[in-house]
Amino acid sequence: MSGERVRPVLFIAGGGTGGHVFPGLAVAEAVRALADVEVVFVGTARGLESKLVPERGYALELLDVLPLKGGGAIRVTKGLLAAARASAASLSLLRRRRPRAVLSVGGYAAGPVSLAAALLRIPVAVLEPNSVTGLANRWLSPFSARAYIAFPTVAKDFATEKVRTFGVPLRRGFQASPYEPGASLHLLVLGGSLGARAINDRIPVAASRLMTAHPHLTILHQTGKDEVQRTEEAYAHASVKNVTVVPFIDDVPAELSRADVVVSRAGAGSVSEICAVGRASVLIPFPHAADDHQATNARAVADQGGAVWLRQEAADDMRITSELLRLLGDAEVRRTMATKARLFGKPEAATTIARDLLELAGIPPIPLEA
């Protein structure tokens, strides 16, 4: 009907991995809590966004975009041709949907629509949660009006006046939880939503040794959906009984608050969640992450005393055992590390970014009730 009010639109462009999709979803949730706005995601059918975005009730526009990195000259050529087609499709999409601003969350789907938005003079912001700027966001740097970052190491990739060091946007529920040691000890193992086979294989062996020093230690181990049986069998073979193995943890904030020590990969989201709550951790970065950014994430926190980090090739079960025995055996070390981790934690990052993005888009927030 002609009298209906048309809600303003914001685009969130990019995806591929959870490290791109989950921060975008956190910003979308915060935006919708602040303003009457339609949030539309733009991604590919191959990325995690194709499943996660519709599940959460957001519109998803799909582009046919291919990665440019890896695979040699043939892949680059195919990728460039696909990018040209996606750029034309992006111009059509932008003219049809008329977003007030575009937020790039990285990944190869972010480039074409963000560049097309800049061509149409639609404000573009980039969200870079990692300690190394991704390829798409590096390309978008000259065209962006904002750069939302978490690690100061990437500030150099953007003009100073564009940078906002707001942290990694997290879904609701994460908040600082001051660490106080209790009578018992609890270890939380997080391999990421898809799991981490190296961690799944090594922790059960380490746990058998930990139980000798701490027989009442309990363990919650998130394995990823395809690794539950293997990991349960590994714990059984190691005669470890006080363990719960699950494919996925729904209430991560609660489990982090319950933990004395966390073992985790070092994606920006995982590190930020641990720091938002504030817990001692042993970080084992995924060795094949683009530009080795997980190692850089882990090092940034560890250099300030907020974590221990081990390269996967050095993190055999003996080294993991040694580090965990040290942490589990010293409550004061755990307390100090948890306090320093919280210095990196920014639980309100999603709301802070959402407010600034709405301002950039010229969309007023809903007035607070008196």
Image: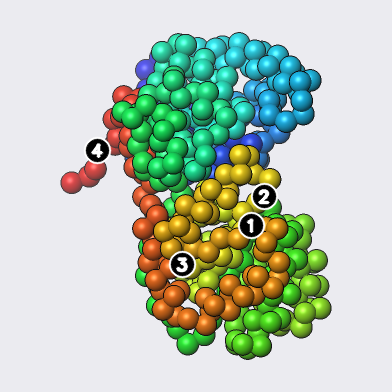
- Mark nearer the N terminus (4 vs 3): 3
Marks 2 and 3, how far apart at CA:
23 Å
Give the Cα distance between marks 1 and 2. Answer: 7 Å
User: Is 164 placed above or below 310 here?
Assistant: above
The residue positioned farthest toward the left in the image shown: 370
Q: Are marks 4 and 2 in contact (CB under 8 Å)?
A: no
Per the model, the C-alpha gap separating discs 4 and 2 is: 47 Å
- Per the image, label 1 sits on a secondary structure element best described as loop
Q: Position of residue 365 (x, y in %)?
A: 30, 35
Sooner in the amino-acid sequence: mark 3 or mark 1: 3
Q: Which residue is mark 1?
A: 311
Q: Residue at x 37, y 17 (%)?
A: 3
In the rendered structure, the answer to whether residue 166 lies left or right of residue 308 reads: left
Left or right: residue 216 versus residue 5 is right
Q: Position of residue 369 (x, y in %)?
A: 22, 44
| Mark 4 in CB contact with mark 3 (< 8 angstroms) | no
- Amino acid type of the residue that numbered disc 1 sits on in the rendered structure: Arg
| Position of residue 89 in the picture relative to residue 225 (left or right) | left
**Mark 4 or mark 2, whichever is nearer to me:** 2
Question: Given this view, does label 2 or label 3 mark the residue nearer the observer?
Answer: 2
User: Dot 3 corresponds to which residue?
Assistant: 279
CA gap, disc 1 to disc 4?
A: 49 Å
Residue at the location (39% across, 63% down)? 340
Residue 265 coordinates in the image, percent (x, y): 60, 56
In the rendered structure, which amino acid carries the disc numbered 2? Pro
- Amino acid type at circle 4 is Pro
- For label 4, the residue is 367
Which residue type carries mark 3? Arg
> What SS does tag 2 mark?
loop
Q: Which residue is mark 2?
A: 287
**Number of other residues with Cα within 10 Å of mark 2, as a class: few under 14, some 14 to 19, many 20 or more:** some
Which mark is in front, 4 or 3? 3
